[in-house]
């Protein structure tokens, strides 16, 4: 059975754009670079040729990876998720019960997670521990620094999905 990968509409579109750019632009550019390098003679000692072939290998690998992820994607419209419980796509405001620090994260797929941008993976330890919680529920999560205790303060729908 194929393991589905949860992904927002925005995340899906971003991966599709990258795939199209790699297939339509970078793949063609690297093929031309290989042709030019071949024209320089002996391929055994041709650094340009070897660099271009390595770049081609990287591009082809990424294309295969993107096709796999897009093929397994379960695209979710985050603007349509409910706010009664923490689910994929919701924006959750938490308070650290030890430090009173307020944290705010949107739960997204593993390829979309970016803590600096305010999103974490639904598959991360914190993401997994929040799933199904309601406002007022406590969340206990093991971190490298020890167990953290947080309280869910608010669950909202994102403005963009």
Image (cartoon, helix red, strand yellow):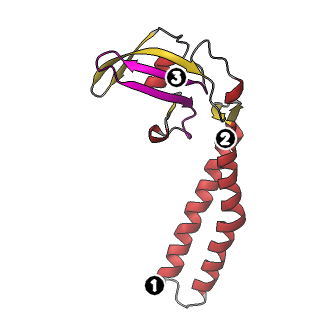
Residue 40 image position (x, y, % from top left): 56, 90
Q: Which of 43 and 28 is in front in this view?
A: 28
Residue 73 sits in which quadrant? top right
Residue 68 image position (x, y, % from top left): 66, 44
Q: Name which of mark 3 and mark 2 comes first in the sequence.
A: 2
User: What is the number of the mark on residue 57?
Assistant: none
On screen, residue 34 versus residue 42, left or right, reads right
Image quarter (top left, top right, bottom left or bottom right) of the N terminus: top right
Is mark 1 in CB contact (under 8 Å) with mark 2?
no
Residue 99 forms part of the magenta stretch: yes
Give the alpha-carbon distance from disc 3 to disc 2, as whole Å.
Answer: 19 Å
* Disc 1 element: loop
Residue tagged 2: 10
Q: Can residue 1 be seen in this view?
A: no
| Residue at the image position 42 percent from the left and 26 percent from the top | 103
Residue tagged 1: 45
Q: Give the range drawn in magenta.
A: 89-112
Residue tagged 3: 92
Q: Nearer the viewer, residue 156 or 141?
A: 156
Instruction: Answer few, some or many: residues within 10 Å of disc 3's Cα (few below 14, many 20 plus, some between 14 and 19).
Output: many
Residue 23 image position (x, y, % from top left): 70, 61
Disc nearest the viewer among 3 and 2: 3
| Residue at the image position 55 percent from the left and 74 percent from the top | 52
Give the alpha-carbon distance from disc 1 to disc 2, as whole Å.
Answer: 45 Å
Above or below: residue 71 compared with residue 57: above
On screen, residue 142 versus residue 36, left or right, reads left
Above or below: residue 2 compared with residue 114: above
Give the alpha-carbon distance from disc 3 to disc 1, as whole Å.
Answer: 56 Å
């Amino acid at each position: 059975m194929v393991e589905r990968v949860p992904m927002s509409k925005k995340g899906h579109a971003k991966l599709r754009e990258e795939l199209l750019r790699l297939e339509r632009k970078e793949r063609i550019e690297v093929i031309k670079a290989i042709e030019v390098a071949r024209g320089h003679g002996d391929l055994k000692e041709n650094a340009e040729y070897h660099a271009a072939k390595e770049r081609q290998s990287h591009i082809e690998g990424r294309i295969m990876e993107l096709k796999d992820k897009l093929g397994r994607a379960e695209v979710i419209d985050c603007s349509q998720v409910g706010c009664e419980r923490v689910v994929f796509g919701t924006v959750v405001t938490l308070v650290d019960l030890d430090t009173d620090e307020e944290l705010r994260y949107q739960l997204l797929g593993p390829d979309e997670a970016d803590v600096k941008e305010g999103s974490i993976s639904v598959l991360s330890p914190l993401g997994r521990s929040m799933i199904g919680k309601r406002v007022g529920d406590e969340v206990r999560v093991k971190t490298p620094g020890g167990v953290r205790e947080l309280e869910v303060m608010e669950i909202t729908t994102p403005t963009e999905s």
